[in-house]
Image: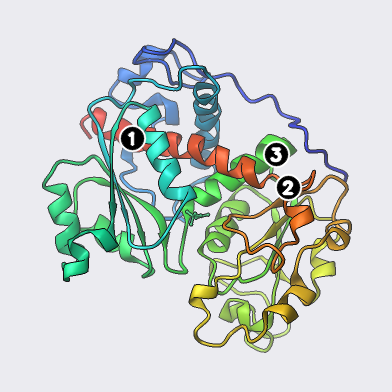
């Protein structure tokens, strides 16, 4: 199946109204004023009950579709000369990052500001966390200053769930340990959909450090829900436990887990054959203390995405990477900046997706739910 990088779908032009109008963000499914009803019809009523975005495992396909459609409208706002609407005026979004970030933190800030919200950024290392304040006391302190949405990144898997169970504000997981990164998955799905026209039935090859990758886990949830075929490949020591040779019988497929139905193959060339999307994962050097990856050059030789390897995939296959990239290790520089790469577009789409997510959560509080 040959794919081109040109969008085959025509994204719904879903923004009505004009800059400065409170109704300037909506979707083609609704009239601007309908956002003021008791249910936010933008998400077909689904978003009215969603308080948090912690992973995609509890999202329906329909809910994911609604967010992707909403992001089309947000992208239209971002394409204007004046990228500003008062849609979330009076709302306060707080980003709390216990780990470094460029894309996620800045795009949430950009998303909130474009929507007219006040955005406050807290870096744990520059806060009273450095004096020993606990996570619970930190988020309770921040909530006491009146916030509507807390965006949190934390090195411990599950931390956003803990926070969500202790505060009233909506919580967005901006990456927790090796567990989940749901807005990265949404922006990945959105980028694929814009180029491929649809995700169902497409083959997506995810290559590399799946063991430590929260992006891969959330992507797998999202891709499975949208009907994609997912094939993964990486060094046995960097595969999730259930996918390692000898850990799950002959089929090497996990049951009842994130990776249920995902095919694992030994050779990267096999994973790439017929792929519509090639996603190279970052080697997470900061999480390799356990010795899972003894040699970077060996890794690069066996699993790095090069021009020769990319040529095995379908003609025009999309090359994706969540960033930040280790160029020359999991991806060669020529393909990372080549014609098939949509890596910078992933970053751009991250703003639109995070606008859609913030809008969804704030719409709930706006309607007094
Ligand atoms: N993809 C991603 O989460 O990048 P950052 O660490 O820069 O936010």
Q: Position of residue 311 (x, y in %)?
A: 88, 56
Mark 1 residue crowding within 10 angstroms, few (<14) / some (14–19) / many (20+):
many
Q: Position of residue 367 (x, y in %)?
A: 25, 28
Mark 2 or 3: in front is 2
The reply to whether callout 1 and callout 2 are in contact (CB within 8 Å) is no
Q: CA distance from mark 1 to mark 3?
A: 26 Å
**Is 44 placed left or right of 302 in the picture?**
left
> What residue is at 70 percent from the left and 39 percent from the top?
198
Say which quadrant the C terminus sits in: top left
The tag earlier along the polypeptide, 1 or 2, is: 1
Q: Position of residue 58 (x, y in %)?
A: 44, 53
Q: Nearer the viewer, residue 129 or 158?
A: 129
The tag earlier along the polypeptide, 2 or 3, is: 3
Disc ID at residue 341: 2
Q: Is residue 13 visible?
A: yes
Q: State the scheme by which the image is colored.
A: rainbow
Q: Nearer the viewer, residue 3 or 41?
A: 3
């Amino acid at each position: 199946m040959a794919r081109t990088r040109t969008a085959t779908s025509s994204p719904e032009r879903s923004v009505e109204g004009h800059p400065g109008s409170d109704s300037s963000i909506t979707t083609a499914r609704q009239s601007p004023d309908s956002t003021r009803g008791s249910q936010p019809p933008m998400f077909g009523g689904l978003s009215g009950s969603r308080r948090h975005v912690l992973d995609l495992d509890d999202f329906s396909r329909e809910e994911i579709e609604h967010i992707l459609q909403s992001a089309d409208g947000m992208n239209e706002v971002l394409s204007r000369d004046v990228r500003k609407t008062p849609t979330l005026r009076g709302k306060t979004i707080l980003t709390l990052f216990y780990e470094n970030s460029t894309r996620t933190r800045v795009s949430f800030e950009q998303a909130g500001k474009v929507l007219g919200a006040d955005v406050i950024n807290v870096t744990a290392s520059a806060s009273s966390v450095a004096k020993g304040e606990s996570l619970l006391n930190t988020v309770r302190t921040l909530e006491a200053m009146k916030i509507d949405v807390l965006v949190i990144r934390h090195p411990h898997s599950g931390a956003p769930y803990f926070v969500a169970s202790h505060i009233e504000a909506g919580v967005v997981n901006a990456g927790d340990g090796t567990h989940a990164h749901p807005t990265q998955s949404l922006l990945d799905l959105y980028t694929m959909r814009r180029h491929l026209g649809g995700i169902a039935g497409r083959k997506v090859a995810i290559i590399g450090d799946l063991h430590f990758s929260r992006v891969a886990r959330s992507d797998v949830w999202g891709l499975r829900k949208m009907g994609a075929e997912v094939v993964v490949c990486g060094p046995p020591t960097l595969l999730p436990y259930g996918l390692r040779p000898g850990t799950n019988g002959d089929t090497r497929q996990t049951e009842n887990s994130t990776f249920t139905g995902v095919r694992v193959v030994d050779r990267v060339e096999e994973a790439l054959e017929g792929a519509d999307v090639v996603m190279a994962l970052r080697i997470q050097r900061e999480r390799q203390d356990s010795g899972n990856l003894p040699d970077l050059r060996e890794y690069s030789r066996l699993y790095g995405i090069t021009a020769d390897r990319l040529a095995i995939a379908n003609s025009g296959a999309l090359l994706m990477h969540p960033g930040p990239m280790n160029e020359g290790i999991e991806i060669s520089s020529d393909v990372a900046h080549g014609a098939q790469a949509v890596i910078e577009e992933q970053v751009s789409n991250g703003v639109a997706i995070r606008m859609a997510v913030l809008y969804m959560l704030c719409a709930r509080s706006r309607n007094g739910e």
